[in-house]
Image (cartoon, rainbow, N blue to C red):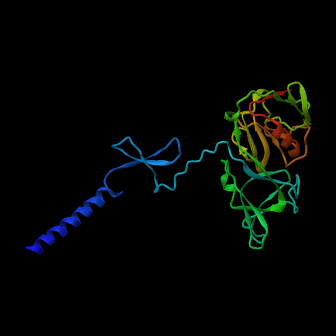
C-alpha cells in the first residue's frame, strides 16, 4: 500500500513539474511580436493576446539595432594631401587590398580627394592604415572592389557630421552664392558682404549648368561620382572621393571640388560647378544648408 502511494506521489510530482515548465517557457504556443519602448529604445516582447509589454528587453533579437544618435555623431574622414595632383602617375597614393604594400593595388588617389574612414588599423609591422568605406549608392558598383586600405601618411584626418540635408536647417541663412556662367566666376556673400570670389568651371555646351535660383538642400564632404549618366552624358568617368559637395538641384547639380583638372575659369563639367579642392573646402565649411544659389549668364 505504501509503495503504491509513493509511486502515485512521484508520478504526480513529475507531471506537475513538466506542466509548469512547458506552460511558462518560450516553447509555449503563444505568438510574440516585438515592439520598442519609446522611453528607453529597448525591444519589448508582447503577446498578440495582450497589449501590455513584458518589461524586459528581448534577448533573442540581436540582429535588430536601434540607432538614433542625438545630436548627430561626428564621422572620421581623410583628405589626401600627398602624391599626384591632376594627372595620375607613379607618385599617386596607392590603395591596397590589405594592410600591406605587397598586396594588390585597388586604386590610385589624387591630392584633394576625401574619403570616409571606417576604421583605423595597426598592421603587424606597426604601421597605421585607414580602412576606407563607401556608404552610398553607386551607379556602377561593379567598378568598386573592397576592401580599401591606405597608409596614414597619405593624408590628414578630420571629423564631420557627414551628409547633412535640409531637415537639419532650423534658421534662415543670410549667405548666398552667385555663379556667373559668362565670366566663369563664383561670388560668395553673407548679406551684402563679399566672403570670396573665385574662378570656377561650369558645364560644357551639351551639359550646361542650369540657370536660375536654387537652394542648397544637402552637403557632404565626399561623394563617388561615375559616368556615363543616361540622358545627360555618354562619357565614362570614375571619380571616388569627390570633395566638399553642395547639392542645389535634385537632378544632381553640385558645387564641389575637382581634383582631376586645373582648368578653372572655363567650362569643363557635366553640369556641376567645379572648384579647386582647397577653395571648395573653404566654401563648404562656410556654407549653410538652405542658402540661395543663383546661376546666371
At a point 60% along the width and 44% down the height, the residue shown is 68
| Residue closer to the observer: 273 or 282 | 282
Quadrant of the image containing the C terminus: top right
Above or below, 99 against 213 in this view is below
Q: Where is residue 254 in the image (x, y as percent from the top left)?
A: 77, 38
At a point 69% along the width and 33% down the height, the residue shown is 166
Above or below, 57 against 214 in this view is below
At a point 85% along the width and 41% down the height, the residue shown is 280
Left/right of residue 27 with respect to residue 243 in the rendered view: left
Above or below, 38 against 98 in this view is above
Query: In this orientation, does residue 236 appear?
Result: no
Quadrant of the image containing the N terminus: bottom left
Report which quarter residue 281 is drawn in. top right
Q: Which residue lies furthest to the left in this view?
A: 1
Left/right of residue 285 with respect to residue 1 in the rendered view: right
| Residue closer to the observer: 246 or 49 | 49
Q: Where is residue 199 in the image (x, y as percent from the top left)?
A: 91, 37
Query: In this orientation, does residue 72 appear?
Result: yes
Report which quarter residue 233 is drawn in. top right
Report which quarter residue 103 is drawn in. bottom right
Q: Where is residue 147 in the image (x, y as percent from the top left)?
A: 69, 61
Amino acid at each position: 500500500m505504501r509503495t503504491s502511494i509513493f509511486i502515485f506521489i512521484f508520478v504526480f510530482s513529475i507531471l506537475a513539474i513538466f506542466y509548469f515548465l512547458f506552460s511558462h517557457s518560450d516553447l509555449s504556443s503563444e505568438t510574440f511580436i516585438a515592439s520598442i519602448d519609446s522611453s528607453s529604445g529597448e525591444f519589448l516582447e508582447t503577446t498578440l493576446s495582450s497589449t501590455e509589454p513584458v518589461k524586459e528587453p528581448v534577448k533573442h533579437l540581436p540582429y535588430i539595432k536601434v540607432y538614433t544618435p542625438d545630436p548627430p555623431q561626428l564621422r572620421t574622414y581623410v583628405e589626401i594631401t600627398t602624391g599626384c595632383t591632376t594627372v595620375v602617375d607613379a607618385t599617386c597614393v596607392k590603395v591596397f587590398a590589405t594592410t600591406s604594400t605587397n598586396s594588390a593595388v585597388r586604386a590610385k588617389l589624387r591630392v584633394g580627394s576625401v574619403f570616409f574612414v571606417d576604421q583605423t588599423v595597426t598592421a603587424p609591422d606597426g604601421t597605421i592604415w585607414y580602412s576606407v568605406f563607401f556608404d552610398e549608392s553607386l551607379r556602377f558598383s561593379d567598378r568598386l572592389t573592397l576592401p580599401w586600405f591606405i597608409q596614414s601618411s597619405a593624408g590628414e584626418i578630420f571629423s564631420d557630421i557627414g551628409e547633412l540635408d535640409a531637415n537639419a536647417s532650423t534658421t534662415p541663412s543670410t549667405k548666398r552664392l552667385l555663379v556667373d556662367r559668362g565670366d566663369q566666376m563664383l561670388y560668395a556673400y553673407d548679406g551684402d558682404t563679399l566672403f570670396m570670389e573665385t574662378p570656377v568651371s561650369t558645364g560644357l555646351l551639351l551639359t550646361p549648368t542650369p540657370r536660375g535660383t536654387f537652394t542648397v538642400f544637402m552637403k557632404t564632404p565626399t561623394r563617388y561620382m561615375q559616368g556615363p549618366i543616361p540622358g545627360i552624358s555618354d562619357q565614362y568617368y570614375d571619380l571616388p572621393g569627390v570633395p566638399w559637395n553642395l547639392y542645389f538641384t535634385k537632378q544632381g547639380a553640385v558645387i564641389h571640388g575637382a581634383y582631376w583638372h586645373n582648368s578653372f575659369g572655363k567650362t569643363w563639367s557635366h553640369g556641376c560647378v567645379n572648384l579647386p579642392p582647397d577653395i571648395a573646402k573653404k566654401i563648404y565649411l562656410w556654407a549653410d544648408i538652405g542658402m540661395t544659389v543663383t546661376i546666371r549668364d
